[in-house]
Amino acid sequence: MWIRSTLVYRTSFAAAVLTNFLVTALDFVVIWMMFSQATSLGGYSFAETAFLYGTASVSFGITALLLGSVDDLGLRVRDGSLDAFLVRPAPVLVQVAADRFGLRRLGRFLQGALVLGWSLTRLDLDWTLVKLLLLPVMLLSGAAIFGAVYVAGAAFQFWAQDAAEAQSAFTFGGLTLLQYPPTVFARDFVIGVTFVVPLAFVNWLPALYVLGRPYPIGLPWWLAFTPPLVAAGSCVLAGLAWRAGVRSYRSTGS
């Protein structure tokens, strides 16, 4: 219904997608400006950094398109509008994600895909069948990991009720983090996003294998092939957190 209503006003829809495209492109403009003053960032070239930017943005774009509406869960808890979702014969998470479905978020995905496509034409890599197959696996696994972070953050709002900013710190903050090479961050920070919140599995670890780069903090190279397992585990944990959150929900009665 939300998609149909959006497409009725095609000019407005095109303007919204274009605006989303341009706003998110500003992140890449910042990276481009950095490379206008330097030849490398943390030892990574512009094309390699663009590859990291593109893979992170495409994965996040898929997640934001499908689950971006769950950011508003805290508001629904506070005003009691979540009650309507609980009495309908459909999963609550699906209803929350589908409500006010923002098709305009397609702009972020398209912008990330454009940068990724450009980087692939500029990288001088020895492509193998394994690397070619790893690329789509990385993008889909990354989207699933971002999705788990989205759902876990939304589940936290059942108790916190006003924690959208905290959720954004892990979702949008995680996206910004992964758009840069891991070598520009401190060792403890890299350990945290590898073993605590597994954002490094979104693109860092598989991308380093594709780029032929050394792994940080002594991590083994075969971790490049574990994002699907990490994504599955993260989704299970996020699902349990969401289920616990729904069971703890107490309506405001408004």
Image (cartoon, rainbow, N blue to C red):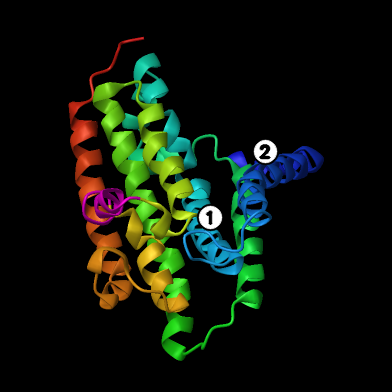
Dot label at residue 5: 2
Quarter occupied by residue 168: top left
State left or right for residue 197 relative to residue 179: left
Query: Which image quarter: residue 100?
Result: top right
Of the pair 248 and 188, the residue shown nearer to us: 188
Q: Is residue 73 visible?
A: no
Mark 2 surroundings: few (<14), some (14-19) or many (≥20) residues within 10 A: few
Q: Residue 151 appears at what percent x and percent y?
A: 33, 42
Q: How many marks?
A: 2
Of badges 2 and 1, the one in the foreground is 1
Where residue 136 sits in the image (x, y, percent)?
A: 47, 73
Cα distance between the residues tagged 2 and 1:
27 Å
Q: Quadrant of the N terminus?
A: top right
Q: Does residue 79 sit above or below 14 in this rendering?
A: above
**Disc ID at residue 57:** 1
Residue 142: in magenta span: no
Q: Identify the residue at horizontal 53%, vertical 55% (top origin).
A: 57
Relative to 97, does residue 33 appear above or below in the rendering? below
Q: Position of residue 249 (x, y in %)?
A: 23, 25
* Residue stretch rendered in magenta on the structure: 186-197
Residue 124 - label? none
